[in-house]
Image (cartoon, rainbow, N blue to C red):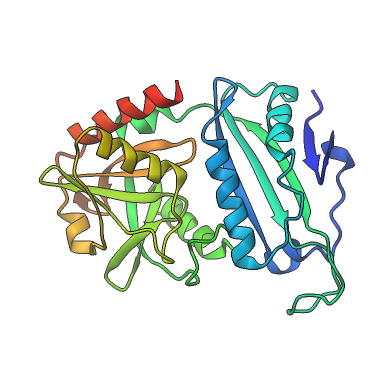
């Protein structure tokens, strides 16, 4: 089956898409994106993702105009046309095409929109068994709250984790733990859940927010405050959150075993609650 994609406001064959060599997304990473989970053909929290896309555009001064009109319907159509049962839909907006210069072009560049789908198996094994992680210095820019195409810091940290037989790099600025390369980080100590506050040092993940809401609904105390590497390594439990990986327990960080080195009781409880939402 030939994959169909969204290119600007048209759904076309992937082979028909041509991106200009002076697209600012290609040359500067000057653009934004979202990844939306699909479970049993249904998207999860599409509205929240598109709201964050709109916020990211505003922060980068990208004028969306009427781009958001009909976008949700087009993404749902893509999922159906490509026969996606479980997986993701990726949507990206670049500032557009203009002669290469760091400053914005005086010519009115029209944003370029692309979106595509990918069928994926749910990562049940790592959700049930947990993962090992690496500690890595956070070298990214200071606006991690904006979901931009500038991902090289995360790319290098993720590859470092893979090179060391780990699933994820947990990032820290000096001694303060921020997040993972593509995940948010939670720890549990004395039955209290902690995660870094949603400021400019992390992306306020949709799954992150969902887990915080679940904690509050279930009477689990959750605290959004900074914690350091020592607190991380001394946690009773830990887990990562992210689109489509959902909630993944942390068993070990480098040579330090968290808790009993297996998914903890509160982590598993939150997993069950999250699974009810997506199912």
Q: Residue at x 68, y 27 (%)?
A: 79
State the image coordinates of residue 247 (x, y, percent, origin top left). Answer: 36, 37
**Is residue 258 shown left or right of residue 10?**
left
Image position of 140 with respect to 187: above or below: below
Foreground: 13 or 134? 13
**Is residue 188 shown left or right of residue 88?**
left
Foreground: 210 or 1? 210
**Is residue 13 shown left or right of residue 63?**
right
How many numbered tags mark residues here?
0
Image position of 253 with respect to 199: above or below: above
The residue lying furthest to the left in this view is 190
Q: Is residue 235 visible?
A: yes
Quadrant assignment, res 263: top left
State the image coordinates of residue 138 (x, y, percent, origin top left). Answer: 41, 67
Q: Is residue 131 visible?
A: no
Foreground: 20 or 106? 106
Q: Quadrant of the N terminus?
A: top right
Image position of 28 with respect to 248: above or below: below
State the image coordinates of residue 50 (x, y, percent, origin top left). Answer: 60, 45
Q: Residue at x 76, y 55 (%)?
A: 65
Q: Quadrant of the C terminus?
A: top left
Image position of 41 with respect to 187: above or below: above
Quadrant assignment, res 60: bottom right
**Is residue 268 shown left or right of residue 142?**
left
State the image coordinates of residue 28 (x, y, percent, origin top left). Answer: 70, 69
């Amino acid at each position: 089956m030939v994959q169909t994609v969204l290119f600007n406001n048209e759904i076309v064959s992937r082979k028909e898409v041509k991106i200009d060599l002076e697209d600012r997304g290609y040359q500067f990473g000057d653009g934004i994106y979202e990844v939306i989970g699909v479970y049993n053909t249904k998207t999860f929290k599409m509205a929240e993702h598109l709201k964050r896309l709109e916020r990211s555009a505003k922060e980068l001064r990208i004028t969306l105009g009427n781009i958001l009109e009909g976008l949700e319907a087009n993404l749902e159509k893509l999922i159906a046309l490509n026969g996606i049962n479980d997986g993701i839909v990726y949507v990206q907006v670049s500032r557009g095409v203009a002669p290469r210069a760091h400053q914005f072009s005086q010519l009115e560049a029209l944003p370029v929109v692309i979106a595509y789908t990918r069928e994926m198996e749910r990562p049940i094994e790592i959700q049930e068994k947990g993962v090992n992680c690496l500690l890595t210095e956070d070298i990214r820019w200071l606006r991690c709250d904006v979901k931009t195409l500038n991902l090289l810091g995360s790319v290098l940290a993720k590859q470092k984790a893979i090179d060391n037989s780990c699933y994820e790099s947990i990032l820290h600025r000096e001694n303060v733990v921020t997040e993972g390369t593509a995940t948010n980080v939670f720890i549990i100590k004395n039955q209290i859940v902690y995660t870094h506050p949603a400021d400019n040092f992390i992306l306020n993940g949709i799954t992150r927010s969902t887990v915080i809401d679940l904690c509050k609904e279930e009477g689990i105390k959750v605290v959004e405050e900074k914690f350091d590497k020592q607190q991380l390594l001394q946690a009773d439990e830990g887990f990562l959150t992210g689109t489509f990986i959902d909630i993944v327990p942390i068993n070990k960080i480098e040579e330090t075993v968290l808790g009993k080195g297996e998914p903890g009781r509160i982590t598993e409880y939150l997993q069950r609650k999250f699974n009810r939402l997506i199912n």
